[in-house]
Amino acid sequence: MKQTLLVISLLFSLTACATEKKAMIVGTSSKINVLTARDQFSPTHIPKGWVIEGADQDKLFSNKDKLPNIYMARKNDRIGVHIQSGHDDFIVARYQATKLLVTPFLIWNWYVSEHKSPHHPVRLVVGFYGGQAQSEPLDPSLLVWRGQELPPFDRLIAIGYDQTALKRGNIYSMGQVKYYVQRGGFEQTNRWHQEAADLFQIYRRAWPDDHLGNVKITFVGMAATQDSGDGGITFSNIQLIR
């Protein structure tokens, strides 16, 4: 299935950074600004705390056939990071190091384009670690951002936009990914929406047997799956809050 390709690329594809970056610990408080207006993405600049995996970085920024897969876009006088689907699965994510119980709510704005597939090919993604009984203790050094690869995760939730509004709130299994429908309906595309999702409740529905008190959020990001019909979403003001 196409949807499972994202997990494969996350687990096995590493995109090295062109320049050495200073290590830093990010995302440890009870209110975390994941994506702000200060975070500007370009072929020569990836903001601190962020990584790109699953596809060649140069290709993502300079797609010669169509629109670039990652670029800064202005939609109705608001600027955000635009993620456009294409030939490859990829993820743009920011390191986090906070417990799910400390920052259980995710809030953001997105401007969703029309799309042909049942599930929009672009979505938010949240990586978690530690909820399973067999989860080994996590070395804190693995949550230190060095600009090269995703931090460890053993659970992954995708939050997306569907064709119909009636599917809102549904959770689907897509390989190792749990896909949560935040919103839907073609009539609500091509406009900004402010959203909020209770990650605690979504996680508990997705994996009811996990130990939620042990769960850490290790990254929050934006991802695109392979899609012949193409589709894009512009994101702004992503936060984790209590």
Image (cartoon, rainbow, N blue to C red):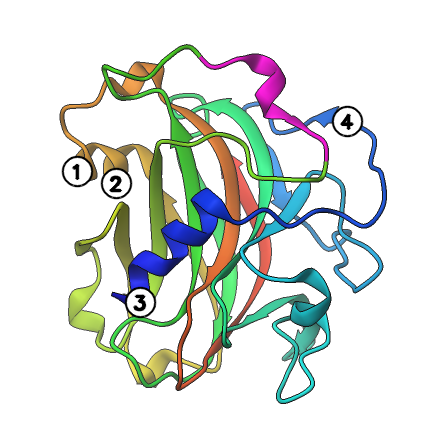
Mark 4 residue type: Ala
Residue at x-position 77% and y-position 27%:
23
Percent x, y for residue 53? 58, 51
Q: Which residue bears the numbered disc 3? A: 2
Viewer-proximal residue among 217 and 64: 64
Would you identify the image quadrant in which residue 199 lies? top left
Mark 3 residue type: Lys
Where disc 2 sits, the SS reads: helix
Q: Which residue bears the numbered disc 4? A: 23
Residues under numbered marks 1 and 4 in contact, where contact means CB atoms less than 8 Å apart: no
Q: How many marks?
A: 4
Is residue 145 shown in magenta?
yes
Between the C-alphas of marks 1 and 2, the distance is 5 Å
Viewer-proximal residue among 64 and 211: 64
Viewer-proximal residue among 226 and 76: 226
Between the C-alphas of marks 4 and 3, the distance is 34 Å
Percent x, y for residue 225? 42, 66
Label drawn at residue 192: none
Chain-order first, disc 4 or disc 3: 3
Q: Nearer the viewer, mark 4 or mark 3?
A: 3
Between the C-alphas of marks 2 and 4, the distance is 32 Å
The crowding category of the residue bearing disc 1, from other C-alpha atoms within 10 Å (few below 14, some 14 to 19, many at least 20), is few
Percent x, y for residue 63? 67, 79
Residues under numbered marks 1 and 2 in contact, where contact means CB atoms less than 8 Å apart: yes
Chain-order first, disc 1 or disc 3: 3
Residue at x-position 36% and y-position 59%:
5
Residue at x-position 29% and y-position 21%:
131
- Which residue range is magenta in the image? 138-146
Q: Nearer the viewer, mark 3 or mark 2?
A: 3
Where disc 3 sits, the SS reads: helix
Residue at x-position 17% and y-position 38%:
205
